């Protein structure tokens, strides 16, 4: 099992998501839950395509952190 970072951003019409470790793997959704569900499907599809092309599944490298600053 591998864990890939997914960045979720709110848009004017819902949410969008991407994974820094999987260039080109993106998704959208009207709700946060929807974009997470859609992104899980997008990652599965992306990795299956890589396998069919004979490519290795990349190792996750991206991390996230929050930095607090005075407001």
Image (cartoon, helix red, strand yellow):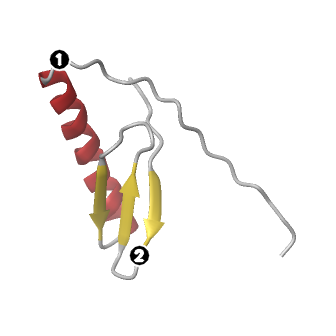
Residue 2, position in %: x, y? 41, 26
* Nearer to us in this view, 15 or 50: 50
* Nearer to us in this view, 34 or 9: 9
- For image coordinates 24% across by 46% down, the residue present is 42
In the rendered structure, the answer to whether residue 53 lies left or right of residue 25 reads left
In terms of secondary structure, where does tag 1 sit? Answer: loop
**How far is the residue under mark 2 from the one under mark 1?**
35 Å
Please state, as top left, top right, bottom left or bottom right, where the N terminus lies in the image.
top left
Give the mark nearer the N terminus: 2 vs 1: 2
Please state, as top left, top right, bottom left or bottom right, where the C terminus lies in the image.
bottom right
- Is residue 11 placed above or below 32 in the rendered structure? below
Residue bearing the label numbered 2: 11
- Is residue 14 placed above or below 49 in the rendered structure? below
Residue 44, position in %: x, y? 23, 37
Dot 1 surroundings within 10 Å: few (below 14), some, or many (20 or more)?
few
Say the numbered circle drawn on residue 54. 1
Res 22 quadrant in image: top left
Residue 28, position in %: x, y? 29, 63
The residue most toward the left is 52
């Amino acid at each position: 099992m591998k864990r890939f970072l997914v960045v979720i951003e709110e848009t004017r019409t819902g949410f969008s998501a991407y994974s820094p470790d999987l260039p080109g793997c993106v998704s959208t959704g009207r709700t946060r839950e929807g974009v997470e569900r859609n992104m899980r499907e997008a990652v599965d599809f992306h990795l299956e395509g890589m396998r069919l092309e004979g490519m290795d599944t990349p190792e996750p490298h991206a991390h996230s952190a929050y930095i607090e600053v005075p407001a």
